[in-house]
Image (cartoon, rainbow, N blue to C red):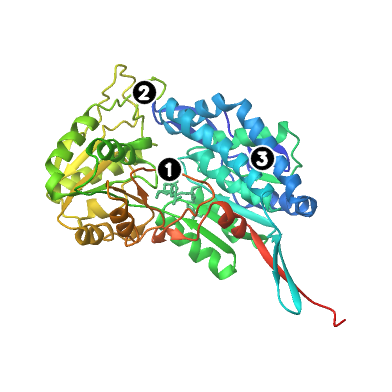
Amino acid sequence: MNALNFIDGVFVDAVDGKTLANVNPATGQEIGTIARSKKADVEVAVQAAMRSRKDWASRSMLERADWLDRIADGLERRKEEIAQRESRDTGKPLTLARRVDAQRSIDNFRFFADFARQQEPEVFEMADATNIVHRNPIGVVGLITPWNLPLYLLSWKVAPALLMGNTIVAKPSEMTPLTAALMCEVASEIGLPSGVINVVHGYGPEVGQAILEHPSIGAISFTGGTATGRHVAATAAPLFKKLSLELGGKNATIVLDDADLDEAVSGAVRAGFTNGGQVCLCGSRILVHQSIADEFTQRLVVAVDAMVCGPPEDASTQIGALISIEHLEKVESYIELGVEEGGTILTGGTREMTGPVIATNAGAFLRPTIIDGLDHTSRTSTEEIFGPIVTVHRFDSDEEAIEMANSTEYGLAGSIWSTNIDRAHALAQQIETGIIWVNTWLHRDLRTPFGGVKNSGVGREGGNWSLGFFSEPLNVCIKHSQE
Ligand code: NAD
């Protein structure tokens, strides 16, 4: 299946006809081609978005909310296909792609449609005047997204951007184009006005860069790595584009001495290894109180050892392939580094599959890995690996846990496991991060702020934060008449 650009309601090749190979990382096989777009393609897409923006902006928010529901209906009709495409593109287990990627992509559109219907006018009364706040569209916005949760993260931006009356030029990751293409097929099927959604595929430094630099794109919403985010900021900030940056993470899972150990172990496994550890929110550094550390770690090893690493389509698979062989090699280099830095591998660290079905060995498979004995400031314990690796560290007091949790350049998320909610809540407020879960992980209410501090990003998405980002507030202050 080939991924073409979707511009002005039509599927088209890149202007110069160039393509890239799309590889299934679980088999190493080429499964299609991707349009390799460049500046000229972005120009055509921006022109289409510019032409359609007045009409789209002139519709009421409620009318646009109805369009979001139609997109959700269209995605729902093709839910299984979303999961299949996502699994083939990423190598993730099909069961996970069904439960998380397909479902949450639909939910994102539904959520913002419903959220729009709950909006109240923003009016501020003074003794002698009334202020009415309008949220105007920005115009054309650029959306750039990564490969780990392809449609889930793209829809999280597309839905609020459209709702607020913007037209979009989106660039999905060059590794995972197939569900963005499906979203465009849905837009076409339901008759969404042409030019409202435009998708240009290709490499970041070619097509992504052209989006960053285009003078008619007023805002950039970017999700991806911290190094790329730094480049995005350096390019777009001098052009005074509005910027939202959702970047990398190195999140702590903090297990206090009064934690329910069964829950803490299964929570740490889920936080550490969901999507093969390729979620920005993954708890890749486990901090555990010294008094329970041996028992916790033993149980953790048993649980991780039992995880099924195998072909994505097998129903028992819990860990599929990583996104590519290159990424696998990068992840493995951290295992080597961990050993050099004095760590001990408690389980994993090899490429073998562990499930009932052993498929082709051309895939990017890595067993879930636990490394113990590292200093919490070591590179392995502080740099984002983005794979199925966790490190375990011991602490003696809450103060020490806080110091350890804060000892990375990242600040995206984390979880605390304790039966004392007041203690956990007090501790949560001292972690330098955007999100902390207590006795749970990745438990999302889409109205709440999502985003990070430090090198994990700038700004928040979710609920009103998304509506605020994708609009320009206009305050109209009307002086009351004297009589
Ligand atoms: P990446 O930074 O390599 O790529 C992200 C996107 O940026 C891709 O579409 C890529 O093509 C594009 N890009 C690359 N160079 C560009 C350039 N010069 N100009 C414009 N666009 C460019 O990230 P990735 O490897 O795709 O994704 C993994 C990273 O994403 C991890 O660091 C992870 O933590 C992060 N992430 C963050 C969140 C979050 O919400 N904070 C969510 C998911 C993933």
User: Residue sitting at 30 percent across and 27 percent down?
Assistant: 309
x, y percent for residue 205: 50, 53
The residue carrying pointer 2 sits among few (fewer than 14), some (14 to 19) or many (20 or more) residues within 10 Å by Cα, namely many
Q: Amino acid at mark 3?
A: Phe
Residue 15 appears in the rendering? no
- Label 3: element kind: strand
**Which residue corresponds to mark 2?**
311
The part of the image, by quadrant, that contains residue 227 is bottom left
**Which residue corresponds to mark 1?**
443
* In this rendering, position of residue 90 left or right of residue 243: left
x, y percent for residue 232: 50, 60
Quadrant showing the C terminus: bottom right
Task: Examine the rendered structure and indicate whether residue 312 appears above or below residue 136.
Answer: above
The part of the image, by quadrant, that contains residue 6 is top right
Q: Earlier in the sequence, mark 1 or mark 2?
A: 2
Residue 6 shows which numbered tag?
A: 3
Front-lying residue, 400 or 43: 400
- Label 2: element kind: loop
